[in-house]
Every structure is written in C-alpha cells, then in structure tokens.
Image (cartoon, rainbow, N blue to C red):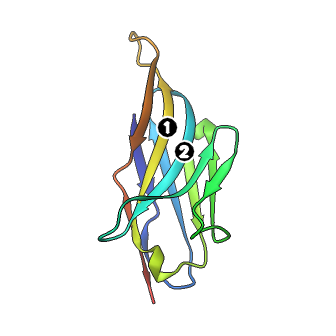
Amino acid sequence: VQLQAFGGGLVQAGGFLRLSCVASGNIISIEKMGWYRQAPGKERELVAIITSYGETHYASAVKGRFTISSDDAKNTVYLQMNSLKPEDTAVYYCNVQGVRSRQPPAPLQWDPEFWGRGTQVTVSS
C-alpha cells in the first residue's frame, strides 16, 4: 500500500489550501483515514481523522477552520484548510489505519497503518 499526498505549498495567513491523499495497492477497505502534522522542533500531532462510517475528529487547534472528507471509492482523503495561520506551518502527513488488501494469489491481508511521505505547508504572516 502506498500513499501519495498532493496540495501543499506556500500561502499567506488567512488563505486556504486543500490537501489530497490517494491510497493505492489492491485495497479492499480502510477503517480510518487522516492527517497529522509535524512542525520544526515539535512532535507529530493529529490534525483530523475520518472513519469509514463518516465520523470525524479534529484537533482543537484546527476545529472550525479545517474540514476532512473522504471518497472511499477512490481511497482518497481530503483536508480543506481555511483561515490558515502561521502556526499551521508544518509537514502534513497522510495516515490510513486498518487496511485490508489482497494481492492475488496471496490471501487477504490486514495492516494496522501506513504513512505517506508528507507535504510541506507554509503559512506566511
């Protein structure tokens, strides 16, 4: 399973960006998809997550500004980031959890999680 993220970049404070992450690799189902971020000198933290049932959870720092959504048929998760602040500057990582996949002739496989490489988001003041 591979994750490829798109949409990072440089934006002024108050602006917006939309991140996308596509999971590929004979995937049958994914239990959760989400985004984490890591700013320089800080630990990686959860930004938002969405379950296969459509339940969402957001970090308090982004609630009301960011919106996570997914297209399960395309194994894609999106993060709409509005009203961006300089403190949102970080490398954003896509994460998927509870992945069922099958590469014939191998049997069905379940993996706890996969990470994408990360995409840089920089918000200037």
Categorize mark 2 by other alpha carbons within 10 Å: few (<14), some (14-19), many (20+). Answer: many
- Please tell me which residue is depicted at 57% across the width and 59% down the height of the picture: 79
Residue 111 location (% of width, % of height): 43, 28
Is residue 117 found left or right of 34 in the rendered image?
left
Residue 99, above or below 59: above
Q: Name the element at disc 1.
A: strand
**Camera-nearest residue between 63 and 27:** 63
Residue contact between numbered discs 2 and 1, judged by CB atoms under 8 Å = yes
Residue 65 location (% of width, % of height): 64, 71
Residue 65, above or below 54: below
> Label 2: which residue?
33
* Label 2 to label 1: alpha-carbon separation: 6 Å
Image quadrant in which you'd find residue 37: bottom left
Residue type of the residue flagged with mark 1:
Gln
Residue 97's disc number: 1
Residue 114 location (% of width, % of height): 40, 39
